[in-house]
Amino acid sequence: QVQLVESGGGLVQSGGSLRLSCAASGRTSSSYAMGWFRQAPGKEREFVGAISWSGRGTSYADSVKGRFTISRDNAKNTVYLQMSSLKPEDTASYYCAANGRGVTGPLRSRYDYDYWGQGTQVTVSS
C-alpha cells in the first residue's frame, strides 16, 4: 500500500503561482508513475499532468500546458506541481495519484492509477 498526502493548496489571485507537493509513504518506490488530477464542484475529475517513474517523461492537459510543470524527487518520494499564471477556471480540488502496476508512464487516464491522495483545494480569485 502507498499513502499519498497533498499539500500546498490555498487561495491565490488570478495570475499568481502555487506549488503543490505530494508526499508518498508506505510501500514507496521510485518506480511509480505519478499524476495530478483536479475536480471542480459538479464536474468530472480531469487529468492535469503526469510524470514517468524516472521523471524523464511528462504529459499535460492542453488547458495547463505552458503554465504548469510537474516534477519529482525520488529521493524524497515527492512529486510536485508548479502552477503559474493561474486562472479562476483552475479552481478545484487537486489530487495526486500513483500507478502501482509497474508501468513507466506518463499516464493520462485516471483508470491507470491505483492510489489517490485526499486532495488539496486551490482557489483562484479574479
Image (tube, rainbow, N blue to C red):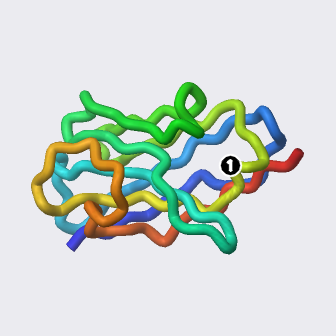
Q: Residue at x 75, y 55 (%)?
A: 123
Q: Is residue 126 left or right of residue 107?
A: right
- Could you tell me which quadrant the C terminus lies in? top right
Amino acid type assigned to the residue bearing label 1 in the image:
Asp
Residue 26, horizontal then vertical, whole percent: 23, 68
Residue 57, horizontal then vertical, whole percent: 27, 31
From this viewpoint, which residue is outermost toward the right? 126
* Frontmost residue, 45 versus 77: 45
From this viewpoint, which residue is outermost toward the left? 102
Q: Is residue 2 shown above or below 52?
A: below
Q: Is residue 74 left or right of residue 92?
A: left
Residue 32, horizontal then vertical, whole percent: 20, 52
Quarter of the figure with residue 97: bottom left
Q: Residue at x 25, y 28 (%)?
A: 56
Residue 124, horizontal then vertical, whole percent: 78, 49
* Frontmost residue, 37 versus 5: 37
- Can residue 75 be spotted in the picture? no
Q: Is residue 77 left or right of residue 13?
A: left
Name the secondary structure under disc 1: helix
Name the residue carrying label 1. 90
- Can residue 54 be spotted in the picture? yes
Query: Total marks drawn?
Result: 1
Q: Is residue 13 shown above or below 93?
A: above
Q: Is residue 1 shown above or below 71?
A: below
Q: Residue at x 20, y 35 (%)?
A: 54
